[in-house]
Image (cartoon, helix red, strand yellow):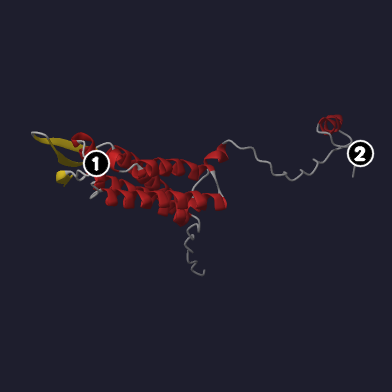
């Protein structure tokens, strides 16, 4: 009797992409939602400090991120909306939304880094407090919060890049609710035995012609 060598069952070709899709989906959702939240939180914090010279001394001044620039907060909201919209579209539309998500993250990073050394918001406050339009803030210092906002933008950028790379493997949010409009193939009529009255009645109930070939 010949020896029969067992042939190992090949792994499914779709198992690898499916795992990559699930893993990338989880990372994108987490990084995108966390990035938007971090960026929005950071823009509400104090980004810079300084003083303005007034009669009799100096007046302390502070500027929040929203005072310095409104771009990071606006792009974080756009990025969060794009993250949700990724699951509502398919095909080319998903690529467009994923690109918007990535660009929102990149824009948030750039705007936050540029705002980290910006003094225009405090200069305006110094001019208002001192009554001198040419006044400038003194003893200027900055906090780490702009870079926290930039880190949030980097997470949004990561989510966008993952959506661009693996988005085609992700499910669509509307797929569960939409009706399948495809034309279903017509069933072949069940075989009818003319000698059995019950078969004739069942065929008539199905809308079939029991006398047809």
Q: Is mark 1 on a helix, strand or loop?
A: loop
In the foreground, 66 or 73: 66
Q: Where does residue 54 sit, x and y in percent of width and height?
A: 13, 36
Q: Where does residue 38 sit, x and y in percent of width and height?
A: 30, 41
Determine whether, in the image, residue 128 is placed left or right of residue 186.
left
Residue depth check, mark 1 versus mark 2: number of the one nearer the observer:
1
Q: How crowded is mark 1: few (under 14 residues within 10 Å), some or many (20 or more)?
A: few
Task: Say if 203 sits above or below 156 in the image.
Answer: above
Task: Say if 28 sits above or below 52 in the image.
Answer: below
Q: Where does residue 56 sit, x and y in percent of width and height?
A: 8, 33
**Residue at position x 31%, y 46% in the image:** 152
Q: Where does residue 118 sit, x and y in percent of width and height?
A: 25, 48
**Residue at position x 20%, y 34% in the image:** 129
Determine whether, in the image, residue 79 is placed left or right of residue 93.
left
Q: How many marks?
A: 2
Task: Residue under label 2, please give it.
Answer: 211
Question: How far apart, in angstroms, are the residues tagged by discs 1 and 2?
Answer: 99 Å
Q: Is mark 2 on a helix, strand or loop?
A: loop
In the foreground, 11 or 75: 75
Determine whether, in the image, residue 114 is placed left or right of residue 29.
left
Task: Say if 197 sits above or below 132 in the image.
Answer: above
In terms of sequence position, does the residue under pointer 1 or pointer 2 come before the other? Answer: 1
**Residue at position x 55%, y 39% in the image:** 174
Q: Do the residues labelled 1 and 2 touch (CB within 8 Å)?
A: no
Res. 133 mark: 1
Asked if residue 158 shows in the view, the reply is no
- The quadrant of the rendering that contains the C terminus is top right
In the foreground, 142 or 18: 142
């Amino acid at each position: 009797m010949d020896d029969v060598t067992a042939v190992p069952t090949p792994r499914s070709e779709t198992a690898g992409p499916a795992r990559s899709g699930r893993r990338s989906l989880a990372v994108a959702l987490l990084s995108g939602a966390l990035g938007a939240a971090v960026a929005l939180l950071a823009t509400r914090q104090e980004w810079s400090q300084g003083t303005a010279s007034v009669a009799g001394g100096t007046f302390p001044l502070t500027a929040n991120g929203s005072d310095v620039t409104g771009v990071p907060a606006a792009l974080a909201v756009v990025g969060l909306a794009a993250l949700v919209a990724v699951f509502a579209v398919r095909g080319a539309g998903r690529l467009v939304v994923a690109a918007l998500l990535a660009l929102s993250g990149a824009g948030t990073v750039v705007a936050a880094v540029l705002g980290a050394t910006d003094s225009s918001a405090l200069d305006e406050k110094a001019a208002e407090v001192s009554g001198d339009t040419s006044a400038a803030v003194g003893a200027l210092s900055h906090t780490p919060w702009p870079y926290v906002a930039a880190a949030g933008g980097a997470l949004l950028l990561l989510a966008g890049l993952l959506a661009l790379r693996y988005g085609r493997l992700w499910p669509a949010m509307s797929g569960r609710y939409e009706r399948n409009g495809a034309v279903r193939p017509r069933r072949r009529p069940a075989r009818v035995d003319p000698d059995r009255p019950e078969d004739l009645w069942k065929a008539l109930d199905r809308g079939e012609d029991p006398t047809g070939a």
